Amino acid sequence: MSELRQQVKTWLLEQKDWLQQAADVGMSKQWNLSESDIIAIANRLKTAEGQNITNERTFDNLGADLDSKPIRLKSVGEIIGIENLAPRAPLEFGSGNLCVIYGNNGSGKSGYTRLLKKAGGKLGAKELKPNVFKALPGERKCNIAYNDGEDQSVDWPANSEAIAALRAMDIFDSEVAAAYLSKESESSYIPPLVSLFERLVAAVGKVKDHLRDEQAALVKALPAIPAEHLQTKCGALYNGLKANSSVAAIDAIKSWSPVEEQELTNLNERLSAVDPTALAKQKRATKGQVGRISTDIKMATEAYTTEKLQDVRNKRQEALTKRQIAQQAGQVASAKLEGVGAETWKAMWDAARRYSALPYPQEKFPVVIDDARCVLCHQKLDEDAKQRLQDFEVFIQGDVEAAATTAEQAYASASAALPVAPNENIIVQACQSSGLIDVALIEGIKKFWANIASSRDTIQSATDQDALIPVASPSDVITSLDSKIAELEKQATQHDQDAANFNRTDALQKKKELEAKKWTEQQSVAINAEMTRLAKVTEFDEWIRLTNTSAITTKGGQIAESAITEAYIKRFNDELTKLGATRIKVKLTKTKAEKGRTFHAIQMVGSTVKPDEILSEGERRIISLAAFLADVSDKTNASTFIFDDPISSLDQKFETNVANRLLQLAKSRQVLVFTHRTSLLVALEDAADKFGKDPNHPSKEWKSLHFNKRWIANFNGACGELEGESVSNAPSTADAIKALENSIYDARKTGEDDGANAYKAIATGLCRDVRILLERMVEEDLLNKVVLRQRRSVTTDNRLAVLPNITLQDCQRFDELMTKYSTLVHSQSSENPADLPDADEIKTDVEGLKAWRTEFKKRPAPGVAHA
C-alpha cells in the first residue's frame, strides 16, 4: 500500500489548493465536515491562491483507516410489535465466537435477521411489519445489547434511524444472495486510499451545492419591461442582458439626452398634427420670437462692450465740460441774478421763446418793440430790460453755447443707444411665448439682462474714476437660442414634408424606440445592479465548473483497480476454492467507476447470460456466498457476521465446506448462523470439534469456549421463542441425561398433583426422550462419534481406539432399552396395550444409563473387542 499511498499523495499535490484543502481537512476530521468547513473550502476555491497548484501539504492522515469500532452482538430481546417475534426471553448469543441458532421454518429466524438488518441500516433493509393478526401495540420496539469495547444496551423503536455502531455488522440472507448475482455491487470494504476518492467526491459535491445555493441567492431584481416596449431594440437588449453584453450597448440603453427628448416631443407632435402646413407656419412664427430674443441679446452685447461704454462716458464728460464753459461764458453783464446759462435757466429761456410766438407771432424773439411786455412777468419792458433780453439772446446764440448743446445732444444720443433691460416679468413672458422651457436657459437670459441693467445704471451715474462694467456675450445662451431656432426650422421643414408625404409607420416605430429608451434609462440603477449580478453569476458558473469530479472519479477508478478490483477478484476466486465451487464457470468483473466508487458484477465465463438465469439454486447460493465473503472478509474491522440459512439448498459437499469456512471466520470474529438444517448444525459442531485447543487458552478446547447453540420455535402463534436445553439439543449426552432427569421430576410431581391422566399425557413424551437419549448415546458414547446422523463424513481421527471397549452386555443393554421405549412411543393394540412405565421406573432406567456412561468412559482401551 505504501506505493499506492505515494501515488495518491503525488496526485493530490498536482491538484488546485482548494481541493487539497478539502482532502486534508476531510481526512483530519474523518470526513465529518461541518458546514463551516464546506464554506471555508468554497471561499478558498473563489480565490486566485486557492486555484493555484501548491505542494506544501503533507497529508499526514492519508491512508488512515476510518472504520468504526468492532462490535459483538450480545442479545436481542423485549421485542414488541415487530414481525411475528414475541419471545418471552431475550435471544442471547453467548460469549463465544460462533453461535448457531436453530429453528424450523416459521420459527422466527428470518424475523431476527430482518430486525438486525433494519437496526444496522443495511442496504435493502425493508420496513419491519407488525403481526397483522394481532392488534397494533402502542409502541413497537426492541432492545439490542452489544459490545463495542464497552457493553451497550439500546431500546430501538421499530423502523427508526439505524444504530450507528451496528452498521459495522455484515449480514447474508436470501436477498443479499440474489443481489450479488443479479446486480452490480460496490465493495463493502473500501480501503482508505480508495474511499478517499469517494469521500472527496462527496465533499466536493457539498462545496458545489453550497456554491449553487449562493448563486441562487443572487436574485434578479430587474423590473419587468412593459409590454409596449417588448418589440423594440432597447427592449430586446434589456430583456436579454448578459454578463458579456457590450459596454457600449448597455450605455446606450442607460442614456437619455435632451436631443432625444426633443425628438420624442417632435414625433408626438407630428403624429398628432391635423394640419402640418399650419403647424409649420406656427413653428416659424415661434422661431421669429426666439430670433428676436437672440437678436436683442446680441445687440445688447455689442452695445455694452468696453469700447462702447467708454465712448458714452467720453461723450458725457465732453458735454459736462462744454456746458461748464458755456456757463462761464454766459455771465451777462446786464444780468442781475446768478445762474444765467444753467440748464434750468436755459429751459426757462427756451420756454419763453416758444411762448413769445403766441402774443407776438410776427415779432422776432426777444420782442423789444415799444410797449412790448416781458413774456415771463408780463410787465412792460424798460430800456434796461430790453437790453438785458437782447444780451441773453446773444449769449444763447453764441458759439460756446452751441458747442455745449451739440455735446449734450451727442451724449444723449449715445446714452439712448444703450439698450434698456426689460423687467423680469417681460423676460419670462417672452420666453414662454417663444416656447422656451429650459429653466437654465431662462435663468441665463434673466441674468444677462440683469447684468445689462447694472452696467447701464453704472455708466449713467458713474464718475470718471468709477470702473466700467462691460457685459460679455452669453455664449451658452446664444448657442441654445440658435439651436432652438435651428430646431424650430427643422421642425417646420419636417411639417412641410409631412404635409406632402408623411410615413406614419416609420414615425410610430421611431416613437416606440424612443419611448423604450426613455424607460430603460429610468432603470439605469437596476441595470447596473443586474450587470453586477450577472457578472457574479458568471463568476459562480466558473467556480462551480471547478467542482467537476470526473478527474477525481477517474483517479479513484485507477487506484481502485489496484487496491480493490484485483484484490476483490482474487478473494472471490479464493472463496470459490475454499467452498469447493471452482467447477462453476463464473468470474467477478469490474463494470464501472462512478463518483469515486467502483462497481463489480458476477458474470458467466464465456457467456453473456446472467448467472441467476442458468445456475441451479444450490450453485446460485454458493456463488453468492463466495461473493459475499470475498466482499466483507477483508475488512480490518472484525465485527459480527450474520448468516440466515446460508446453505438452505446446498448439497452435502458444499455444506461441509461452508461449515468449515464459517468456522474459520469465527476464529477472528463473532459469527451468528440462523439455520433450519440439522445437517448444518452437525457440520458446524463437527468442525468445532476438529478445531482443537483455543490459541489464547491452550488448556481449553476452542469449542468449549466459542461454540454455542440456541433453539427457537413458534409457540402459540408467536415466533422467536427460545427453547431451553432438552434431550435433543443438549451439547452432550451427559447434559441430555440432566435434562431428562429434570423432566422426570416434573412428570412425577404433575402425576402426584393432578392424577394419572395428567401423568400419562407427559409420560409418552418422556418415553420419546429416553429413546432419543439412547440413540444419541449409541452415536456419541458407544461409537464415540465415528458416525453421526446428518454428517456426511465418517470420522476416525482418534476415535476408533475406544471401540474395542464395547461389550456384548453393552449391546444387549441398548437393544433391550431401545425395544422397550420404541414400543411405548408407537401406537398400541387396544387388545394388548403396553402400559406406560411410572416415573420411578423411567428414573431407574435413566440412572442406569448415567452409571453405564460413567463406567464406559473410564474403561481402558484394550485394543481387542471381547464378548
Image: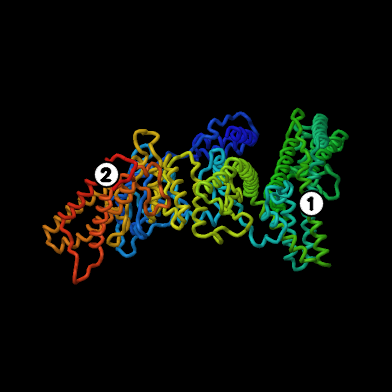
The number of numbered discs placed on residues in the rendered structure image is: 2
Q: Position of residue 409 (x, y in %)?
A: 83, 40
Left or right: 825 with respect to 448? left
Left or right: 461 with respect to 209? right
Label 2 belongs to which residue?
Answer: 856
Q: Position of residue 612 (x, y in %)?
A: 54, 59
Q: Position of residue 329 (x, y in %)?
A: 83, 30
Quarter where residue 687 is shown: top left
Q: CA distance from mark 1 to mark 2?
A: 150 Å
Label 1 belongs to which residue?
Answer: 292
Q: Residue at x 32, y 65 (%)?
A: 133
Q: Nearer the viewer, residue 745 or 181?
A: 745
Q: Nearer the viewer, residue 61 or 748?
A: 748
Label disc, if present, on residue 73 of the rendered structure = none
Q: Position of residue 805 (x, y in %)?
A: 30, 44
Three-letter amino acid code at disc 2?
Phe
Viewer-nearest of discs 1 and 2: 2
Q: Is residue 335 visible?
A: yes
Picture layout, residue 224 above or below residue 298: below
The N terminus lies in quadrant: top right
Picture layout, residue 440 above or below residue 223: above
Q: Nearer the viewer, residue 226 or 831?
A: 831
Left or right: 524 with respect to 739? right
Quarter where residue 373 is shown: top right
